[in-house]
Image (tube, rainbow, N blue to C red):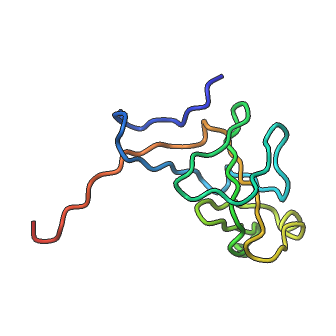
Amino acid sequence: ATNRAAVTTAVPVGTRAAVAVRPSAVAVSATPPPATAPPATAPPATAPPATATDLTVVAEPLQYLEPRGDVVRVHGRTLTADVPPEISVDLDLPPETILYFSFDASAATLYAATPLTPRGA
């Protein structure tokens, strides 16, 4: 299987793009998934994610935990994950702890970035 995001429109090579993933489709762990080597430090936001099979894995620091009714939203710098409260107890780590956010590539949607138009232009 290929590791490609679902494309909503054709995105030419070299075009700036954004990927969106619903927090409910993202898993989070304090340890890297199998076959994923842990990075020495968190990659910059512009670094491509590491991949293992059809799973996209992004290592980034924990920012904060947000209770949201029957789930807890785990915030990284660029990704969020909705997890059950009992899982969040295991993740009650200090901010900046490296976490591994993972999602199936088919859960992602790719959008071509549109250039900003100055006001009054």
| Residue occupying image coordinates x 52% and y 51% | 20
Above or below 57: residue 73: below
| Residue occupying image coordinates x 76% and y 68% | 70
Q: x, y (%) of residue 97?
A: 78, 69
Q: x, y (%) of residue 121?
A: 9, 65
| Residue occupying image coordinates x 81% and y 62% | 84
Number of labels in the image equals: 0
Residue 86 found in image quarter: bottom right
Residue 54 found in image quarter: top right
Residue 79 appears left or right of 31:
left
- Which of 101 and 7 lies nearest the eye of the viewer? 101
Q: x, y (%) of residue 39?
A: 75, 52
- Which of 63 and 66 lies nearest the eye of the viewer? 63
Q: Residue furthest left?
A: 121
Residue 74 appears left or right of 116:
right
- Which of 41 and 77 lies nearest the eye of the viewer? 41
Residue 44 appears left or right of 33:
left
